[in-house]
Image (cartoon, rainbow, N blue to C red):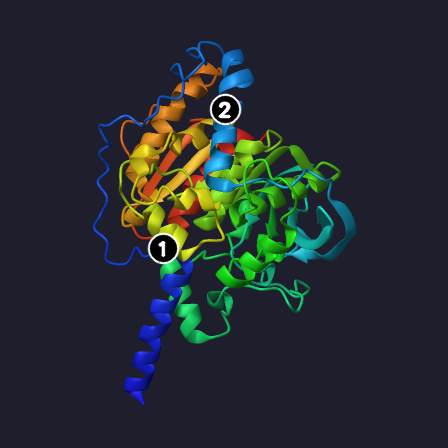
């Protein structure tokens, strides 16, 4: 019997590691010394018929749209039309959450893509103090019942989600916490509230499930006509979901639409960063361990490869991206272009020393290259000297801690310090 349990545990571990795509266990420690090579291509140099970028107007009017279109056509696919979210319901679950310090609300939105309609639930934990409050919108890789395990937070039958979200299973629970950390989904809500921030939890898998089979089926069902940047893909649609929630926040009296910060970890760090790059209403982003297809460079051939990520998660990206597998050097772009599209708004890139799979050094290099755009647009340049040089007052900041892929107390402490600097009144 013990042998059977041991075998079952090993199989469960392998399944979870394969499903979540963050195989960091046993990887060597990442050096805190920056890479010496400069990301290519240069974001501001002459390209084709485009001259050197010298002014903020040059960037805003010509170069930023160029990089945006490049990334969509080569990596993320077409983004659905920005059809305004329709409010279906908005109710209070309790005003006595966290010993009376917060109110828990449930918002249900109708999102429209072409002829298709989707329901998107968002649950907000809002301080019981005068507002409007800055809000952290946290994209979960599991339904809101896991992010906010409170009475009144429910998930509809038929919502698809990964197996590791079954936290009622002791084996799955222990493995998920081992892989993702103590704050796998649920953030330190008491600390967030005490710092004056609201927290909004949403699961974008309600629109496109994070599954090769059901995700590809969902994407196929909504594809239509001529698509400017290729077929829809999950990361792009999830970023669109964040913008539709932003539509709702703009109508709220208790949430400050001028201070909306997107938070995502791993796969949702990719979509949160993309949403910030595409939607200038987003005031800031915390993109934690976003890796390949996120903030990490690809031409340096470190960490998860394009071949590995597109074979394991074909629904995440447009099919064009997979064509670069094994020929990353031929790409006319790299991910520092995505980071630069957040400029000059605050961006925090989180990383860890045992997460070579997400390539912290490549992410640092991307930030350093994007820092030139931040400076061009009037923000301070990226000035961190090495990966350990966390600067909470920096508009473009880099955070690096010991440990593996996951969300831990060692992450949320610098997150909150950075948030206080940029978004507290």
Give residue 52's mark.
none
Q: Residues within 10 Å of mark 2 (few under 14, many from 20)?
A: some
Q: Do residues under tags 2 and 1 come within 8 Å of each other at their CB atoms?
A: no
In percent of the image, x 31 and y 28: which residue is there? 39
Provide the residue designation for mark 2.
Answer: 66
The one nearer the camera, 401 or 203, is 203
Label 2 or label 1, whichever comes before in sequence order: 1
Please provide percent x and percent y for residue 104. 68, 54
Please provide percent x and percent y for residue 134. 62, 37
Instruction: Specify the farthest residue to the front.
Output: 226
Quarter of the image where one finds residue 242:
top right
Q: What element carries label 2?
A: helix
Gap between marks 2 and 1, in whole Å? 31 Å
- Left/right placement of residue 227 relative to residue 332 reads right
In percent of the image, x 45 and y 21: which residue is there? 374
The one nearer the camera, 157 or 93, is 157
Q: How crowded is mark 1: few (under 14 residues within 10 Å), some or many (20 or more)?
A: many
Please provide percent x and percent y for residue 321. 42, 42
Provide the residue designation for mark 1.
Answer: 22
Q: Which of marks 2 and 1 is in front?
A: 2
The N terminus - image quarter: bottom left
Quarter of the image where one finds residue 12:
bottom left
The C terminus - image quarter: top right
In percent of the image, x 22 and y 34: which residue is there? 33
Residue 406 visible, this orientation: no
Q: What element carries label 1?
A: loop
């Amino acid at each position: 019997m013990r042998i059977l349990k041991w075998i079952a545990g090993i199989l469960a571990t392998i399944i979870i590691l394969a499903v979540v795509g963050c195989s960091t266990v046993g990887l060597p420690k990442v050096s805190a010394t920056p890479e010496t090579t400069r990301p290519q291509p240069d974001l501001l140099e002459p390209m084709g018929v485009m001259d050197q970028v010298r002014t903020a107007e040059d960037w805003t009017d010509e170069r930023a749209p160029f990089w945006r279109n490049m990334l969509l056509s080569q990596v993320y696919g077409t983004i659905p039309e920005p059809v305004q979210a329709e409010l279906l319901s908005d109710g209070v679950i309790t005003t006595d959450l966290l010993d009376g310090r917060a109110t828990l609300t449930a918002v249900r939105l109708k999102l429209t893509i072409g002829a298709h309609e989707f329901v998107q639930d968002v649950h907000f934990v809002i301080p019981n103090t005068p507002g409007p409050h800055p809000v952290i919108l946290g994209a979960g890789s599991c339904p809101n019942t896991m992010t906010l395990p409170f009475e009144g937070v429910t998930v509809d039958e038929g919502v698809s989600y990964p197996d590791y979200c079954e936290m009622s299973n002791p084996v799955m629970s222990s493995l998920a916490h081992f892989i993702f950390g103590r704050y796998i989904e649920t953030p330190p809500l008491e600390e967030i509230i005490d710092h004056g921030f609201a927290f909004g939890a949403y699961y974008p898998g309600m629109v496109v499930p994070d599954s090769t089979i059901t995700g590809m089926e969902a994407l196929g069902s909504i594809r239509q006509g001529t698509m400017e940047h290729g077929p829809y893909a999950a990361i792009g649609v999830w970023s669109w979901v964040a913008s539709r929630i932003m539509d709702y926040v703009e109508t709220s009296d208790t949430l400050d639409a001028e201070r909306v910060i997107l938070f995502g970890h791993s796969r949702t760090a990719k979509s949160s960063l993309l949403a910030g790059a595409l939607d200038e209403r987003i005031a800031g982003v915390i993109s934690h361990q976003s890796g390949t297809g996120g903030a990490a460079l690809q031409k340096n051939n470190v960490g998860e490869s394009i071949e590995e990520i597109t074979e394991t998660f074909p629904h995440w990206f447009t099919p064009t991206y997979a064509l670069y597998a094994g020929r990353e050097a031929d790409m006319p772009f790299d991910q520092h272009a995505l980071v630069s599209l957040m400029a000059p708004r605050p961006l925090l890139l989180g990383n860890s020393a045992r997460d070579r799979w997400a390539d912290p050094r490549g992410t640092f290099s991307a930030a350093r290259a994007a820092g030139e755009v931040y400076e061009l647009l009037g923000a301070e340049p990226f000035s961190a000297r090495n990966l350990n040089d966390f600067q909470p007052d920096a508009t473009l900041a880099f955070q690096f801690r010991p440990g593996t892929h996951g969300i831990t107390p060692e992450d949320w402490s610098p997150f909150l310090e950075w948030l206080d600097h940029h978004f507290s009144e």
